[in-house]
Each structure stands twice: as C-alpha cells, then as structure tokens.
Image (cartoon, grey):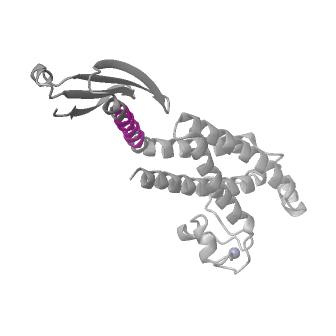
Amino acid sequence: MLIFLNLFIIFCMFVIGTLFGSFFSLATYRIPRHQDIIATRSYCTSCKHKLAFFDLIPVLSYLIRGGKCKYCGEKISIRYFLLEVCNGIVFVMFYLIFGYNLKLLSVCLVYAILFVIIGAQVMKSKMTDEEKNEIKKNNKKGVFISELIVALIIFTIFMASAFILTRNYNRNINKMIARSNAISLAVYNMEIALATDYDSLFSKTTTDNIDNIDYSVTTSVTKYSDEDFEKEDLVKKIDVQVDYMFNGENLSFDLKSLKGKVL
Ligand SMILES: [Zn+2]
C-alpha cells in the first residue's frame, strides 16, 4: 500500500515538474522580449497561432503531435520537450532527496528563481537582431525587473498551492509510516522478550529514533499469575508498548503476548 502511495507522489511530482518546465519555457522566452507572461495565451513561435488547452499539456502534446505545430506543421524544437521531461525528473529527485516538507518547497523555489533568471539571460543572448531591433523601437531596454518579479510571484503561488493541496494527504502517509515503524519496533522487542528464558522477569524502556521521530519502547515481562508459577506451570505475560509523538499528537502502539510451558 505504502509503495503505491509513494509512487503516486512521485508521479505527481513529475507532473508538477513538467508543468514548471513548460512554464519555464514560456517565461524565459517572453521575459527578454518584454512580453506579458500571464494574460497572453501561449502561441506557436513560427505561425503565432494561439494554442488551445489540449496543445499545452506538457510532454504529451509534443508526443501526440509528433513534435510539430498542429496549425502550421512547423517542427517544434525538442528543447521544449526535453526541458519538460528533465524538469519532471529534477522535481522527483528533489522529492527523493529532501522528502515532502518545507525544505523541498524552498529548494524548488530557489531552483525556479535561478532557472528563470539564468534562462532569461540565455534566451536573451539567442534573440535574433530583428527581435532586438523591435524591442529597441518600442523603447524597452534589458530585462524588465517587473516582469521577473511577476514570474517569480506566479512561481511562488503555483508552488504554494501545489503544496497546500497535497500537504494533508502527505501528512497521512507520514503518519502511516510512523505507525508502521512503531509496529516494527514492538515486534522486534517482543521477539527479544520471547527469546529470554522463562524465569527472568523484567521491565525496561529503550529509545529509538527513526526518520526524526523518537520512539520510547517499554517492554515488561511479568508473571501471568502467582498461581501458575506455584504450579510450575510457568506463564509469562509480555507487554511491549511503543510511545511516540507525531505532529504534536501522542500516539502509542501496544503488543501483548503470553509465553508458557507446562511441566
Ligand atoms: Zn505554428
């Protein structure tokens, strides 16, 4: 079950990454040209035809159209496709390295900011003289800071909403992982208690830290009843309790067993 949920997050991260890649293409192309990056719909750079919603699906649209513009048949640079795919992979890698938390959000944001700033400069250097002259005619110089800021604000909103939408979902997954770790610890300590000889009775508390969560494991081995011991029908009661804290909530997992022999 957990592996499927994890694969689902990886898939979502890939999709978010490709969406970002698609947006990076747009932003780095338009910013040096002083074009609006929000209101103006995406268009084919050769025939200027506005693209419909289905033409804008990252990765898939490119594959379905065989890398050609639906309207003029002009070849679309594979750079767009590769950027989307690579970006999807980068986002998945960030998730695998940092986990799903605020660190991931900051890393993705820093990455997005650097990408737009450097990408816009690279795209600016690739502009044709004709394009440069047109900008000069319109009396615009260099990269507009306001355009960069708009791009960054959009990234921030985009990232933050993606994270807010999936935060609860992810918290539940982490809670399940924490519980499964608690169960593993309980079973492990139970096995040890079961392997000890019949006569030893004890109670001890050990601590363990898994994935930054502190687990306190209390193992107690007591007599099942005095009567049983007198009859030499030795029965021990083994109780393992694992206490841990998850998101400010005190949780515990209890495992009980009996071990006995009839002489
Ligand atoms: Zn076209």
Residue 79, image quadrant:
bottom right
Q: Residue furthest bottom?
A: 73
Give left or right: position of 179 versus 117.
left
Relative to residue 185, is residue 105 drawn left or right? right
Q: Quadrant of residue 87?
A: bottom right
Check if residue 182 falls in the magenta segment: yes
> What type of secondary structure mainly makes up the magenta span?
helix
Return the residue nearer the eye: 37 or 169. 169
Q: Tell me if residue 82 can be seen.
A: yes
Residue 145, magenta (yes or no) = no
Q: Which residues are magenta?
A: 173-189
Can see residue 138?
no
Residue 196 lies, with reference to residue 68, above or below; the image says: above
Q: Where's residue 32, x and y in %?
A: 78, 51
The image quadrant in which ligand 1 is located: bottom right
Residue 86: % across, % down: 68, 57
Q: Is residue 113 above or below residue 228?
A: below
Q: Nearest the camera: 170 or 262?
A: 262
Say above or below: 256 vs 57.
Answer: above
Q: Left or right: 83 with respect to 204?
A: right
